[in-house]
């Protein structure tokens, strides 16, 4: 067969933004009716528009494995949704040649009350497999998921690991010609992630076309020879993935855990103090893009004091993905508290304790402040970014719970439960 | 793997579009699995299990028999009133649960709709299918009560599939329309149960024998409500009695129009579901 498996031309997707915060895109009937009655001939005022994708062009040949990268809000998810036919584009078109399977999450349509066996059939059918196909692969799926003994147990009684394994096993046995995969690998423990990556690698060798979206740069470079970098709804790089991921990590917009300002002329700062570098590291001193919930996070700033005799306080605001300021931290090292600094190079590290931040991307700004008189010498918002990932081993603050875990922070608190044998009569008997 | 000639073009929405019957047919197994899931989940943890489908019309029959039959003096003509009212209730309960479940089905399937593609019409259709399952069980109850009163089925039972088809199309059309409207306007979450509640009282053929010569106003209303004739006919098919052919003809036209209109409106706005839901 000739011609590309995926052909995307001038693809655009526009969303209308609601005017107030927290407002959704649906209206109440009363609003529609009353505006129709009051001004029947006037068009509705134009809502603010936002192009999640615009002018996207690319082609993927049959058998190619392509990674899609970009920071949050770059349009990756929207692109996946359009390619998976979940939502329609506003401009342009996509031609898909071949049977398409898309995996935007593992376990879509899993029902907690149904047994493992029943969910395999339900989920398989939702993913587009025929009943005969599922029946033929049933034993293979069960073996991959390692849940033989619990096939007739409702999945709500499964451990989180079993649940994810079963869900992934069904998905892994889908055999489309074009596979569109979202970051489903960001679940489960490290061993299982490896198993999934292995399976993905296997699948890619069978000549299938794969489009793979991930934050995990390692996975992208390992699995995909080619990558496409999206930024603000546009393709800004398309080529061999080592080059594209490098471009991503070093671009100003990219999620990068370390920044160096080597040119004094452009470095943030003034005649008194200048920012030299800023990075996210772990206890061993290694720069880290991804840090697990059970590790402490170091925010390390290096700055050069050019003019001696000033009290200087390095400080960092930490924001999460939703733009919420999780906290702000000021240097509290007693050594330098209210002390005038001599000229020279300083490196300060602030340690965020382990089991403190919730999962997700965190953006850290770098600022240098003098309080009396108030003076901000430099402030570099979103200077670095890093990701917190759950160990998913049942030891983090979420325990064995697998679902969405809200909150800006998720400290592991000290819990204590007292138990009195016997109890009082109005307690339910156990 | 042999290359297939599957080809899909994804384009901006084009407004009104026809129902893609071929695609729906290809996804028939999914519709079946969705029905099977709904039925299974509903009865899996309920203590009374499948009996629940029987209990609902049975309890209503008791209440109607005591309050309308005994106290209100309603009669079913030659048919014992409990049997009379149960026949109406079995048909009505199917209609009400089909419309109610289909109406909330799309909102209730948010996870599916935002994560995977399949013909969206499968969702309300499957909800109607699950109501159909309950209906078949309650038909069993009806059979038992008919045997209790030694009331043999009428020969007119041959018309039953046709009469039921009218009910099915009306319920599916209305349910599909409400499912789409509920996504566009959240108010319909409250409108749907209200329509169903009012509908029961506004459909007198459920609980009373219609007068032989109704007044002009009543006549108009009976002609306007497309459920009156099918429910009366449903009873006549099973228990005997005059078939309201004129009313059925109007209802059949309304049913087809409602079904087509509901599906078309649903198809028109389904492209926005994932963004709006």
Image: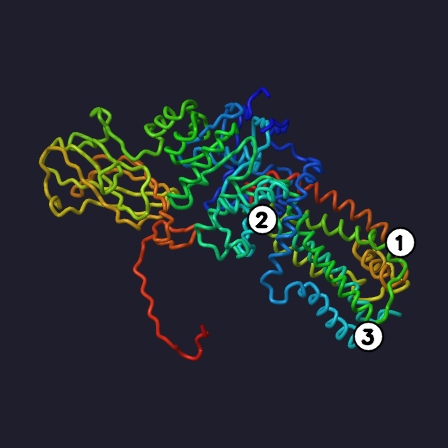
Q: Which of marks 2 and 3 is nearer the N terminus?
A: 3
Residue wearing tag 3: B73
Do the residues marked 1 and 3 share a common chain? yes
Q: Give the spatial CA distance, label 1 vs label 3.
A: 28 Å
- Name the chain letter of the residue that bears numbered label 2: B
For the N terminus of chain A, which image quadrant? Answer: top right
- Taking the spot 41% from the left edge, 46% from the top edge, the residue there is A188
Q: In which quarter of the image is residue B260?
A: top right
**At 44% from the left edge and 78% from the top edge, which residue is drawn?**
A426
Q: Nearer the viewer, residue A22 or B256?
A: B256
Q: Nearer the viewer, residue A387 or A314?
A: A387
Give the secondary structure at mark 3.
Answer: loop
Residue at x 26%, y 49% (from the top left corner): A353
Disc 3 crowd rating (10 Å Cα; few below 14, some 14-19, many 20+) is: few
Relative image position of residue A67 (x, y in whole percent): 44, 30
> In the visual, does B170 lie left or right of B44?
right
Location of residue A389 with respect to B72 vertically, above or below: above
Q: Which of marks 2 and 1 is nearer the N terminus?
A: 2
For residue B245, the mark is 1
Spot occupied by residue A40 in the image (x, y as percentages of width and height): 64, 41
Few, some or many residues within 10 Å of mark 1 (<14, 14–19, 20+): few
Q: Give the vertical position of B73 relative to B4 (above or below).
A: below
Query: Could you tell which of marks 1 and 3 lies nearer the N-terminus?
Result: 3
Q: Determine the chain carrying the residue at label 1.
A: B
Q: In which quarter of the image is residue B261?
A: top right
Which residue occupies the extreme top position in the image? A2
Kindly state the secondary structure of the residue where label 1 is placed: helix
Residue B109 is marked as 2
Between residues A45 and B253, which one lies in front from this camera angle?
B253
Quadrant where the C terminus of chain A is found in the figure: bottom left
Q: Determine contact: label 1, label 3, CB under 8 Å.
A: no
């Amino acid at each position: 067969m000739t011609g590309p498996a995926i052909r995307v031309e001038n693809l655009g997707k526009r969303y209308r933004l609601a005017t107030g915060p927290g407002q959704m895109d649906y209206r109440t009937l009363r609003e529609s009716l009353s505006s129709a009655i009051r001004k029947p001939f006037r068009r509705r005022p134009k809502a603010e528009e936002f192009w999640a994708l615009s002018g996207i062009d690319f082609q993927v040949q049959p058998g190619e494995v392509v990674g899609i990268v970009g920071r949050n809000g770059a349009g990756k998810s929207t692109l996946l949704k359009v390619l998976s036919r979940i939502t329609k584009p506003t401009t342009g078109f996509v031609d898909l040649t071949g049977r398409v399977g898309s995996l935007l999450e593992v376990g879509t349509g899993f029902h907690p009350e149904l047994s493992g066996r029943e969910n395999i059939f339900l989920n398989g059918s939702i993913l587009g497999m025929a009943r005969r196909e599922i029946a033929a692969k049933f034993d293979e799926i069960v073996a991959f998921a390692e849940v033989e003994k619990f096939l007739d147990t409702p999945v709500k009684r499964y451990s989180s690991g079993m649940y994810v394994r079963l869900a992934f096993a069904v998905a892994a046995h889908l055999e489309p010609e074009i596979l569109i995969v979202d970051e489903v690998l960001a679940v489960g423990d490290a061993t299982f992630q490896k198993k999934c990556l292995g399976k993905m690698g296997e699948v890619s060798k069978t000549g299938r076309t794969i489009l793979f979206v991930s934050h995990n740069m390692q996975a992208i470079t390992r699995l995909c020879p080619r990558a496409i970098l999206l930024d603000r709804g546009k393709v800004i790089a398309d080529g061999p993935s080592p080059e594209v991921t490098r471009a991503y990590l070093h671009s100003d917009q990219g999620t990068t855990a370390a920044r160096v300002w080597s040119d004094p002329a452009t470095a943030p700062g003034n005649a008194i103090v200048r920012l030299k570098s800023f990075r996210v590291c772990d206890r061993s001193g290694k720069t880290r893009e991804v840090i697990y919930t059970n590790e402490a996070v170091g925010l390390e700033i290096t700055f050069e004091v050019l003019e001696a005799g000033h009290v200087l306080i390095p400080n960092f605001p930490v924001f999460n993905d939703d733009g919420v300021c999780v906290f702000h931290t000021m240097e509290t090292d007693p050594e330098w508290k209210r002390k005038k600094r001599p000229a020279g190079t300083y490196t300060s590290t602030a340690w965020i304790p382990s089991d403190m931040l919730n999962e997700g991307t965190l953006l850290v700004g770098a600022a240098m402040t003098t309080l009396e008189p108030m003076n901000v010498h430099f402030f570099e918002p979103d200077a670095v970014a890093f990701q917190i990932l759950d160990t998913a081993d049942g030891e983090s603050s979420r325990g064995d719970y697998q679902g969405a875990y809200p909150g800006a922070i998720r400290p592991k608190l000290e819990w204590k439960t007292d138990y009195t044998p016997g109890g009082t009569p109005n307690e339910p008997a156990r | 793997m042999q290359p297939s000639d599957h080809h899909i073009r994804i384009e901006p929405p084009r407004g009104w579009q026809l129902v893609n019957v071929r695609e729906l047919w290809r996804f028939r197994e999914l519709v079946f699995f969705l029905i099977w899931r709904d039925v299974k989940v509903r009865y899996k943890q309920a203590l009374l299990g499948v009996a629940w489908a029987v209990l609902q019309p049975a309890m209503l029959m008791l209440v109607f028999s005591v309050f309308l039959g005994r106290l209100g003096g309603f009669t079913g003509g030659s048919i014992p009133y409990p049997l009379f009212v149960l026949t109406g209730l079995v048909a009505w309960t199917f209609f009400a649960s089909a419309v109610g479940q289909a109406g909330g089905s799309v909102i209730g399937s948010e996870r599916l709709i935002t994560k995977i593609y399949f013909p969206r019409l499968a969702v309300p259709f499957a909800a109607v299918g699950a109501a159909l399952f309950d209906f078949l069980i309650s038909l069993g109850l009806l059979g038992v009560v008919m045997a209790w009163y030694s009331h043999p089925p009428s020969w007119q039972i041959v018309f039953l599939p046709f009469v039921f088809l009218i009910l099915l199309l009306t319920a599916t059309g209305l349910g599909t329309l409400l499912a789409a409207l509920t996504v566009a306007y959240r108010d319909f979450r409250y409108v749907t149960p209200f329509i169903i509640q009012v509908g029961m009282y506004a459909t007198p053929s459920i609980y009373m024998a219609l007068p032989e010569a109704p007044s002009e106003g009543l006549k108009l209303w009976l002609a306007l409500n497309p459920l009156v004739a099918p429910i009366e006919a449903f009873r006549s098919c099973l228990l005997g009695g005059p078939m309201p052919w004129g009313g059925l003809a109007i209802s059949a036209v309304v049913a087809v129009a409602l079904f087509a209109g509901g599906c078309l409106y649903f198809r028109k706005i389904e492209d926005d579901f994932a963004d709006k839901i």
